[in-house]
Structures are given as structure tokens and as C-alpha cells.
Image (cartoon, rainbow, N blue to C red):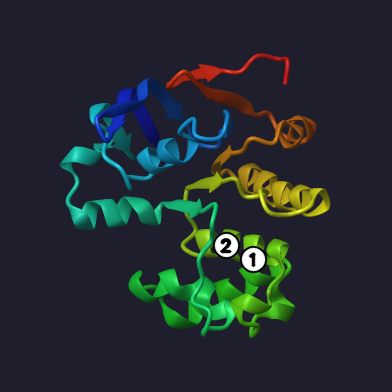
Amino acid sequence: MIELDEVAYSYGGGELLTDLSLRLAPGSFHFLTGPSGAGKTTFLKLCYGALVPTGGQVRLFNQDVRELDRDGIAYARRRIGVVHQDCQFLDHLPVAENISLPLAVSGQDRLAAQANLKELMSWVGLAHRAQALPPELSGGERQRAALARALILSPDVILADEPTGNVDWEMSQRLLKLLVELNKMGKTVMIATHDLSLIRAAKHHVQARVLRISGRKLQLAGADL
């Protein structure tokens, strides 16, 4: 699905990441950890084609990102739902319309899309907030809205960048439960987080592989987490 082969990424003349190799298999669950500034967000951007590697090869669904044109990248990214660390919404539009924005460019049947939207908002617990404006949402509601928007096109892969970074422990557990449920539905999930407690809690619910970025390289974390 997503494969990195000896990938490197340099920025401003300095090498940020080097010698990264990873295969995200269908239905797998990964955590990505490492200190702030280690390159977790950059790594995720390489995984969904927002950045092109300066060395090595990234393949999205068996296609090299360097060989994909703009339409090819756009099509591949429809199959990858991204929950950004700083989720941005259009503050003048209700939550439901913000979540459904990706549908506007996907060409999906409007009635079917609306039915999917209603079901999705109920699943993330936001059905009662459908007409609220983004500034009216709590931190946890914003993160659940961000997750719903990432899922609206029914992607095969979900990449979440610090999805619990701005919420309390109870809400972080609720978000984790939703992501675990998605994995049990067959979705591939990767969560970038510095919260080791979240990773420990997840191990009771899902078989997860834990990766760590350290010294610009990707390492398999040990059992000491």
C-alpha cells in the first residue's frame, strides 16, 4: 500500500531523515514516536505524497511518487485519510459542511454521500453538532471532526499526526478506540505520537508495531515502552 525504500529527505541543505525503509501492509497498525523535531510530521508527509523524497523511493499503491502527475497524486491521496496535528476548518461553514468538503471534488453520488456523512458523524459522536461552527467546538470535538473529514472518502489508510495532542486523557482514549475500530474494519492505521502512555494503553486492544525516529533513522522500538 505504502512503501518506503531507503528514503532520505533533506531540507535547507541539511539531511532531516535518512535510510528509511518501511512497508505499511493492509490492515496493519503502527505507532510512530520520537522526540519533538525528530521528523515525524515530515515522515507522514512522505507517506502521503505531500513531500517527494530527496533520496530513495516512495511507492503509493505500487506507483513511484516521482512518476505520478498531479491527478495521480490526487487519486492516491483519496485512498489515504490524514488527520493533521493542527486541524484547520473553514470557520464560516457548519461542521457537517467542513467534514463533507472532500466530497465536493470526488464526484460521488450526492444522496449516497449525504447518507454516509450522517452515519459517519454519528459514529464519531458529532451528530448533535452538525450545524455548529468550528469555533464553537471543544478540542475533542475538533479532533473527532478532523477524523471524520479524513474518513469521508472511505480511505484504505489513515495517517494521524498527534491526534490526541490537545485533548485530555479520557478523550484521547475515545479517539484511540475509534482508530482501533477502524483497524478492525481492515483499515491500515499509523499514529504519530510522543505520548508513550497512549501506546501502552493501545497494546491492550490492538497488535501494534511501534516505530521510533532517532538520529534521523527509523528504528523498531523495543518492549520497554
Which residue is depicted at the point 56% across and 71% down? 116
Image x and y of residue 58, in percent: 30, 33
Q: In which quadrant is the C terminus drawn?
A: top right
Q: Quadrant of residue 124?
A: bottom right
Element at badge 1? helix
Q: Nearer the viewer, residue 107 or 94?
A: 94
Q: CA distance from mark 2 to mark 1?
A: 6 Å
Q: Nearer the viewer, residue 216 or 207?
A: 216
The answer to whether 2 appears left or right of 204 in the picture is left
Which residue is depicted at the point 56% across and 33% down? 28
Q: Amino acid at mark 2?
A: Ala
Which residue is depicted at the point 51% across and 75% down? 98
Image x and y of residue 187, in percent: 55, 45
Contact between marks 2 and 1 (CB within 8 A): the answer is yes
Image x and y of residue 125, in percent: 73, 68
Name the residue tied to disc 1. Answer: 142
Q: Amino acid at mark 1?
A: Arg
Q: In the rendering, which numbered label is found on residue 146?
A: 2
